[in-house]
Amino acid sequence: MTALYTKTVIAQKGTIPDFKVQRYRGFSTVSRKSKNFALYDFELIKQDILNHFYVRQGERLMQPAFGTIIWDLIFEPLTDEIQNLILQNVNQIFNSDPRVQAGNILITPYETGLEIKCTLQYVLYNIQESMQLKFDQANGLTT
């Protein structure tokens, strides 16, 4: 008969065993930071948001509202109306994920595309991080 547990550790009363809690688990085949495609916590949240921005709105099967309109507007001149449409879409994407709150969203054009900068607040962790996305006409989305 083989023992299932080779070592049993009982914590003393009033102490908490030392282990890392991973609240969010997932995988990504495009992640450069993981050897086995597994992503956890912050990295998973970031990848989920990036996936939303990689998809042109209307491309996802059975979810026509998923994705961004930026790919359809990237060749248009950045008028106030277009900028407001993009800002609404970006806010909609961030608001669709309850794990983050976005603030200070700034949209700026450059020679061959648009750049979006924002501050992300990871709600569960109370940590802020800045995110910069470049929508380039020739190269696609770069971070």
Image (cartoon, rainbow, N blue to C red):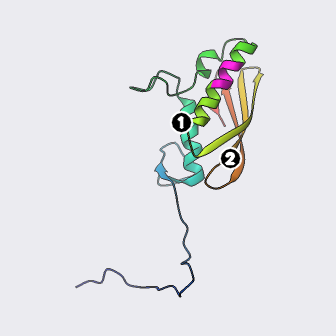
To which residue does mark 1 refer?
51
Q: Main secondary structure of the magenta part?
A: helix
* Picture residue at 47% right of the left edge, 86% below the top: 10
Q: Residues within 10 Å of mark 1 (few under 14, many from 20)?
A: few
**Nearer the camera: disc 1 or disc 2:** 2
The image quarter containing residue 68 is: top right
Can residue 139 be seen here?
no
Which of 1/18 is in front? 18
Which of 17/136 is in front? 17
> In this image, 59 relative to 6: left or right?
right
Of all residues shown, which one is farthest toward the bottom?
A: 12
Please state which amino acid type lies under the numbered disc 1. Answer: Asn
Residue 87 among those drawn in magenta: yes
Which residues lie in the magenta part?
Answer: 84-88
Q: Is residue 55 above or below residue 72?
A: below
* Picture residue at 45% right of the left edge, 23% below the top: 64
To which residue does mark 2 refer?
121
Can residue 104 be seen here?
yes
* Picture residue at 68% right of the left edge, 46% below the top: 121
Report helix, strand or loop for mark 1: helix
Residue 36 among those drawn in magenta: no
Tell me how far mark 1 sits from mark 2, CA to CA: 18 Å
The quarter of the image holding the C terminus is top right
Q: Residues within 10 Å of mark 2 (few under 14, many from 20)?
A: some
